[in-house]
Image (spheres, rainbow, N blue to C red):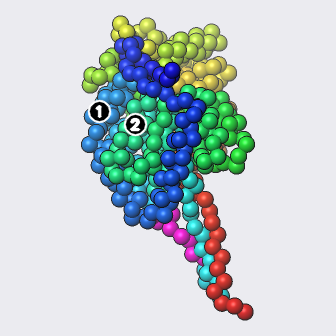
Amino acid sequence: MTKELRVINPYTEETALTLPMLAPGDVDRVVSSARKAFEGWRWSTSAERRALCERFLDAFDGNRDEIARNISLQMGRPIKHAHNEVNTTLDRARHMIAIAEETLRDEYLPEKPGFVRYIRHEPLGVVLDIAAWNYPLLIAVNVIVPAVLAGNAVIIKHSSRTPLCGRAFVDAFEKAGAPEGLVQDIYADHAVTEGFIRHPGVNYVSFTGSVRGGHEVVQSARDKFMHVGLELGGKDPAYVCADAPFDFTVANTVDGVLYNAGQSCCAVERIYVEQSIYDRFVEAYVAETRRYAVLGDPSTERTTMGPMATRSAPAFLEGQVRDAVARGGRLVVGFDEFVKPATGWFCPPAVVADAPQDCSLMREESFGPVVGILPVANDEEAVRLMNDSPYGLTASVWTADLDRARRIGERIETGTFFMNRCDYLDPALPWTGVKDTGKGASLSHYGLLQLTQLKSMHLRVAMP
């Protein structure tokens, strides 16, 4: 009997759709199809790859309304934010298309008498993209389009919460005229997914998810020399200096915590504030949080915060807040201040001032609309506390002093450092992390190069 994937709408709490899942015996068939497509596509020209991806963009854009509705249906994002994700997905893909030819062209070395020497960037083969649900288009596009541009075939294993997002990429590539099997999606449980990772025909795995999941991917791939890219989340800090643009900083750090109901790998999850403006900042932050949060039906334009995508998330977040208060924190915005809809896995915002550094709220990834705020005496203390984490995805400083920001940023253990910005990816910069956040990079020219294999061409053209 075929196993089924059942997707629950987190707002209605009813079954939204069911899909047939692959059996272990299907792994060879899917990988063989991908390898067949790769063997032809690897010899395509940069112009052919660009043209296919541009046609993909047209097809994807033409289906934007359905794609956005499906995001809200599957994981509860407010519809206006779902449309924003479609727009950003297209923008990221356009950037990667624009830089691909220059990034992947052969690199010729300086002339040496009697020799021609150059470096090729050759495709890896079959790329398995295991994508997460929280930004189901953006996380996927970071790998799919660059992989195709680099000459690879792609198998998308999207989250079981957002399988229709993987299908959206496949449909658009098929409409664009991609070779059969070049971009495929699969619905698979853990055991079957492990079968894909272990398959000798799969050459690269990109995984976005938990630290535990990242370790499992590495263990599954341990018996073969395979490239692996891991993006495993964070506990991203913000440091608000006394000279920060005050109103701008308050509004943007609130958005950095609450956007997408806090379900972002690079959401602001802890805030340190210079002592001299601490009380003023907390007061303004509380007011802005109460103004920002409108919980409700994600299909309506008025809603700014939809339900959590996982049923267990609200209870976990409530536990983090209770722990912070029990350890001496002050609950300045509480869950019960907000009206929750009658159905749905909702978690209202919560803000804990004076949250101790050793509490769960300041150390363990929350992935929800809760945050702790703590005063610091100076930059030295801020740097020490910001680095006191097993993660290192992004960090931000809020100040009017560029030199101060640079000095702080050079000392922070993180993949991306922001000044007066947060919760954002620039496709021209590599998306990477340190410590338990993972390894490898996506986006920028480094993201393209990660999906290739170096080959040195050393040609003697004149005999001695």
* Mark 2 Cα shell of 10 Å, populated few (<14), some (14-19), many (≥20): many
Q: Is residue 106 magenta?
A: yes
What residue do we see at 42% from left, 18% from top? 8
Residue 66 image offset from top left, x and y in percent: 29, 33
Identify which amino acid the numbered label 2 is placed on: Arg
What residue do we see at 44% from left, 30% from top? 163
Q: Which residue is mark 1?
A: 66
Q: Quadrant of residue 75?
A: top left
Q: Nearer the viewer, residue 246 or 179?
A: 179
User: What span is in magenta?
Assistant: 101-109
What residue do we see at 43% from left, 36% from top? 166
How many numbered marks, from 0 up? 2
Q: Is residue 336 magenta?
A: no
Residue 35 image offset from top left, x and y in percent: 53, 51
Q: Quadrant of residue 458?
A: bottom right
Residue 237 image offset from top left, x and y in percent: 56, 33
Q: Is residue 68 visible?
A: yes
Q: In the displayed structure, does residue 112 sit left or right of residue 172? A: right
Q: Which residue is mark 2?
A: 167
What residue do we see at 59% from left, 46% from top? 202
Image quarter in which the C terminus is found: bottom right
Residue 217 image offset from top left, x and y in percent: 65, 36
* Mark 1 Cα shell of 10 Å, populated few (<14), some (14-19), many (≥20): few
Identify which amino acid the numbered label 1 is placed on: Glu
- 232 to 297, vertically: above or below: below
Query: Which one is earlier in the sequence, the residue at label 1 or at label 2?
Result: 1
Dot 2: what SS? helix
Cα–Cα span, label 1 and label 2:
12 Å
